[in-house]
Amino acid sequence: MRITALTFALGVLLTCASSSALVANPPTVLITGASRGIGLEFARQYAERGWNVIATARTPADDNLLQDLISEHENVTVEELDVTNHAEIDALAKKLKDQPIDILISNAGISGGYENQIFGKLKYKSFDDVFAVNVKGPLKIAEAFINHVAASEQKKLVNISSTEGRFSQLRGGGGYFYRGSKSALNMAMRNVALAVKSKGVIVGILTPGFVDTDFTARFDSQLKITVEESVSKQIAVIDNMTPDMSGVYVSHEGIKMSW
Amino acid sequence: MYRLIPLLFLGLNIVVPAPAALATDPPTVLITGSSRGIGLEFTRQYAEKGWNVIATARSPKDDNLLQALAKVYNNISLETLDVTDHRDIDNLADKLHSQPIDVLINNAGISGGRNTQQFGSTDYSVFENVMNINVLGPLKITEAFIDHVAASDQKKIINISSTEGRLSMIRGSRMYFYRASKAALNMMMRNVALATKDKGVIIGIITPGLVDTDFLAGSRLPKQLMLAPQVSVERSISTIARLTPELSGKYVANTGEVMSW
């Protein structure tokens, strides 16, 4: 009786000590732009669920917060990836060729800088950067990793978009390149959803809400939500994503939106 | 004797000079990509209406159809313009600095081709070209010519978009870059409309329909579904003429119908 109790106690102790041990054969999630903000939070929350997390960033060795996360969770691995570098994307896809990816989150994104997007003084170089990261990156990643996702159980390819790409709800001018990039991303992913239907892959087009991270630092607003809240809600939406949600514009509250 | 006067008057009415000479101070229209297709047709129809037409193309001296048109109508002037060359655009804006432009038509556009934009076989070098011509061109031109248009009577900047940019209605999965470029163009121009409101400039986003030009060459679409350029442009011109400030930044079909995005 005592031996059973002891074994039981030991088992509980061991289970609590390592958060990833609870889940046998955990699903795998790959997240781009995981060095900070929403990407880092996705990595953290999925790690705490016990998932196998592949966090990517441009220079992970320099990302202290990401390094802290790795030291806290043995189920998080880090890969170097610049989403504007297509050779790197192909190389990573090849390196991970035997790794099914249940959820791929194309999160990496840039705003292009407010000061570069003033009508009358548009800095067109910024357009190239914004579209390279926000549109071509996710599209190339979708192409390169489609089979990894299709080989998994959950088969979800999620793109972090923005309500700034939403035609029916535009407020005020500005952010020309950024907004254009999110509309273009939405269109590209709507297309991808149709293309990958036969593989059973669900393509998510998710908006995170107005989140308090470096990305929105220039806006002083009471309306911002915490990154914890945004991501836990997005994860809930992703959990519940069914094939009929593929290619659909969805908010972090799970609300389907018009374009 | 007096009974003859009405007859004489009638007689005078019959002798009507060619359309171009009648209009005093005709409006001015500038059209990009005017060497063929929709652009060429816009040039022809506005010229016939007696407008002052500034037709631009990358190398007008090589464009036979455009040259022929310019010989028939003395109210057409030709300008060289590559919409991907921002210095070119600034230079032309400078050259025309004292010319108010009633209607500016951002028509130049490319499809990117059929085989380079399918999922799994995308050629990203094509992406750049499609974006530069279809999105950045119109945006830069709008910036460079905003004051020319604001100084005119009609104050209209028209962007030729496409229903291929219509997120709520796309069919099938193809032409990724082209569709993305039209969605981006739509969004940018919707935005620009907000910025140009105080200058009184109306930003049109018009879809020409499925038009039978070189643009659709090689397409498997049956010709019966396509519109003749003449019909498409007639409708567009009519819609442009009826564009009010409320329609600025809205997605409008060539028939004048406002569409969802």
Image: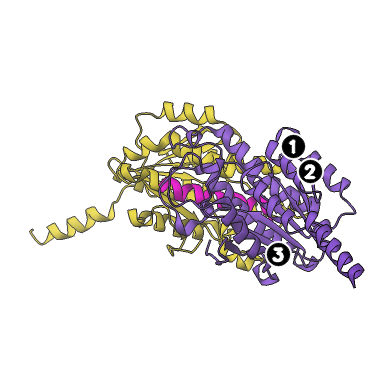
Measure how far apart labels 3 and 1 are at the Cα level: 34 Å
Query: What's the magenta region?
Result: B174-193
Label 3: how many Cα within 10 Å (few below 14, some 14–19, many 20+)? some
Q: Nearer the viewer, residue A185 or A217?
A: A217
Q: Percent from the top left, x then y, of residue A176?
A: 50, 43
Q: Nearer the viewer, residue A208 or B226?
A: A208
Residue B182 visible, this angle: no
Labels 1, 2: one chain: yes
For residue B59, what is the image quadrant? top right
Could you tell me if the residues under marks 1 and 2 are in contact, i.e. CB atoms within 8 Å?
yes
* Horizontal side, residue A41 vs residue A149: left or right: left
Q: Colour of chain A?
A: purple
| Kind of residue indicated by mark 3 | Leu
Q: Magenta residues: mostly which secondary structure?
A: helix
Q: Percent from the top left, x then y, of residue A15?
A: 81, 60
Q: Percent from the top left, x then y, of residue A92?
A: 83, 44
* Horizontal side, residue B41 vs residue B171: left or right: left
Which mark, residue A78? Answer: 2
| Kind of residue indicated by mark 1 | Pro
Look at mark 1 in the image and give the residue it sits on.
A60
Look at mark 3 in the image and give the residue it sits on.
A194
